Amino acid sequence: MVIADLLGVTRMTAVTVNDRGRISHWDDTAADLFGAARPQALGRPPGELLRLPREHRGAFEPEAFGQVWCGACTLRRADNGEPAEIGWWIYPVEGAPGDHGVRVLALAADLRRLRRDGIGITVGDLLLAPPGVPGPAGAAALRPAAVRLLRVEPALAGPSPDGPDPFAGPFADRLAELLPALDPLVFGKIASQVLGLGCPAVSLGLTIRLPIVPHTEAAPAPAPTVPLPRPLTRAPADRPPRARRDLSHALEPLAFLGAAGEQIGSSLDHLQAARTLAEVLVPRLADLAAVELLESVVTDSAPPADEVDETTPMRRVAVAHNDEAGRWDEAVPEGEPLSVPSRTPFVQAMRTGRPVHIPRVDDARAARLAAAFGARDLRPLFTGRALLVVPLIARGRVLGTFMLLRKPDRHGFDQLDLAMVDELARRAALCVDNGRLYRREVQVAEELQRSMLPDDPPDVAGARVRYRYRPAEQVAQVGGDWFDAIPLPGCRLGIVVGDVMGHGLTSAAIMGQLRTAVRTLAAEEMRPDRLLRQLDGLARRLGEDYLATCLIAVYDPVERRCTVASAGHVPPVLRTADGESRVLPVPPGVPIGVGGEPFETVEFKVEDGSRLVLCTDGLLERRDRDLDAGLEELRARLAESTADLDGTCDDLLDRLAGPTPADDIAIVAVGFDGIPLDDVVTWQLEAVPGSVPWIRAQVGARLADWGLHDLAETARLLVSELVTNALVHGAGSVGLRLIRGRGLLCEVHDDGADMPHLRHTEATDESGRGLQLVGHLAARWGTHRTAGGKVVWFEQRVPRR
């Protein structure tokens, strides 16, 4: 890497910005370079005219940046939109307040021509020149065919420590040509400030092809060469010890970068990556390291900010140092929210995208830095130390900064240190941003899962439900297993367990659709086999990927009966009240989405005190156990268990599931308690008008026996409406059933096929308001079909004792 003078090599222009932030000087070279004529440019903000990247606009704001900045960026020309690769050297200029003079001097050079032509650049004793261009006396020439520029980056050539800078005079003369309209006194002041900050230069990275010649006994005369880094190969055993030490010393930074990058990237937690960054920097590169991230990055509540200023909230997330333990805990505590003024190096680094390096912090600057952090006196932290503030930028967005400090007795940051810190900053920023994106993915997956799975088991009469869900150990903590417990008419309970083929967000989305479909179809009072048939048809219409196994069970606490149908799912296990357990012989069926095969429903009588456990195959299958062996172990564990339903679910997870399950696991455990026979009463009615007052009286008397006097009047009124509708609009026999459970349920059934529905009635209509009255007075009401007709029902809330 060589610093070379730019004069006469490529086009360069000077642009000045006044104290109002507007362009005040714009020459023909600038117009040709940026594609904007002078009238179009004068009086406009440079960031707006040049369409600079947001991270570079702060360099044109001396009140925010406050120091010289050099860098390169690709811009679109204002006239035709073609890309232009520009090298920048932007100098803040101090002037008298109120004179509307120059506040920023920006030198811009065309780097594309420099990269393409490579003309007139002398590297040591070698001239990079095209054919036919003679080199200076005593210099050999390398043709373009032998050399390739890998990198062209703007840099600063500071004042020479050995005496006057030989380039200062020619540069000042060239600068005078670029700024012909300035008053000589004003120009002299500007030139003095610019020369004190450093002349423009470029840092070149070269690849040079060297000839390979046969070996001869007589050594040929050495040809002029460019010093090249030695190959990074293992030192042979016969190499002299000093050479091996030199090679080891040269490889040490690379080894450190490799190990540090591996440590930083070892976690998917963005905050842990920031903490690891601080830890690897101390003590190799700094005596104190502190990482500050934007609050939006810490919480991932919003994308990182496009614009960063003193109003942007930040948070210090990591601090590491090699002082005594607790030395800086109160001064720079972790987790502290920050609001950093715009003139500090922290905002400067984030707005320009370039590190801010202060070789030694004097007392005045230390006081200004300490004032930015509130009432605490941080001057001892900064005074006399080397300070380096580096931005964390990933994918074009600023994430935060990290600050490095070296003690006064330690030398400042050299070029190798700066290069290593820059490389670590790039790696750490990507790790932090990847961790942030991963956290967002996990949050989206978890939120999707929470929205698609039931929150709490339903509180129903005659049954208790508990369930557990454990996702597979994968990147997105969500899968296609689902479960549900659905209260159905007649105090019945529907239990569903399913497993969509595959994992991840796609399977979870399919699971959500199927779960919604099951809930909708279950409300239509379908038998489990019919419900699976409807679900299978829906899945095949939605697409080929809609494949799932499913098991549906419906428990009737009045009849003490459980009906079950399966679509290729694991059969359930029933544990009776006396402790005997067995796998229910449910026909397996084919998975949902396959089609072509019927589903079968089987019925089982279940006694009070028994339990039914449904699960997905993730609980049963492991590398050392197949599905049948897992099912047998589940049966045995359930027979031995004496815990309640919650304890049973936890025990099954602990005993049967592996520590890192390869598949999602869902468990639903149902305790069958039944509804006492004394809480159920049924009447068969004659299809005559006189049945209405008779059943009103019977319902009133029964509610009095149950102690539900407060519900009697409303119940009699609603019973009259429903029984009358059944006699007038129904067919066949009419019956009524009262069930006292969590609420008072009244069902009126008849053999008619026409379902009643709400009607819009006019003021003069003499009928049609019965169901409106039911909907107004009942807590819930509905209708559903049966094998031989229909049922219309309503429910009233029973006051809690």
Image: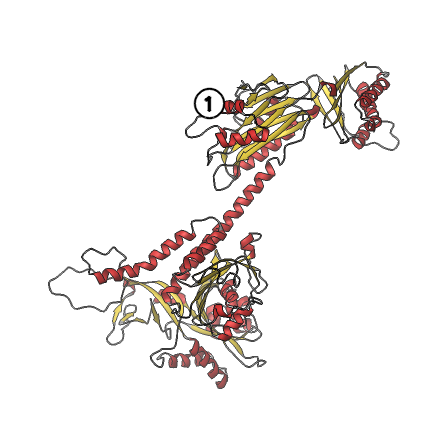
Percent coordinates x, y for residue 420 in the rendering: 38, 61
**Quadrant assignment, res 443:** top right
Where residue 141 appears, as percent x and y from the top left, is 26, 69
Q: Quadrant of the N terminus?
A: bottom left
Marks counted in the figure total 1
Q: Quadrant of the C terminus?
A: top right
| CA neighbours of label 1 inside 10 A, class few (<14), some (14 to 19), many (20+) | few
Q: Is residue 40 above or below residue 674?
A: below
- Disc 1: which residue: 628
Q: Amino acid at mark 1?
A: Asp
Q: Position of residue 474 (x, y in %)?
A: 47, 40
Q: Is residue 581 left or right of residue 112?
A: right
Q: Does the rendering let one see residue 498?
A: yes
Q: Residue furthest right?
A: 764
* Residue at x 46%, y 28% (from the top left corner): 621
Q: Residue furthest bottom?
A: 185
When the figure is inspected, residue 260 is found, relative to residue 615, above or below; the finding is below
Q: Helix or strand or loop: what does disc 1 sit on? A: helix
Viewer-closest of 692 and 361: 361
Residue 679 shown left or right of residue 61 in the figure: right
Q: Residue 710, image x and y in percent?
A: 83, 29
In the depicted structure, whether residue 790 falls above or below residue 337: above
Q: Is residue 793 left or right of residue 258?
A: right
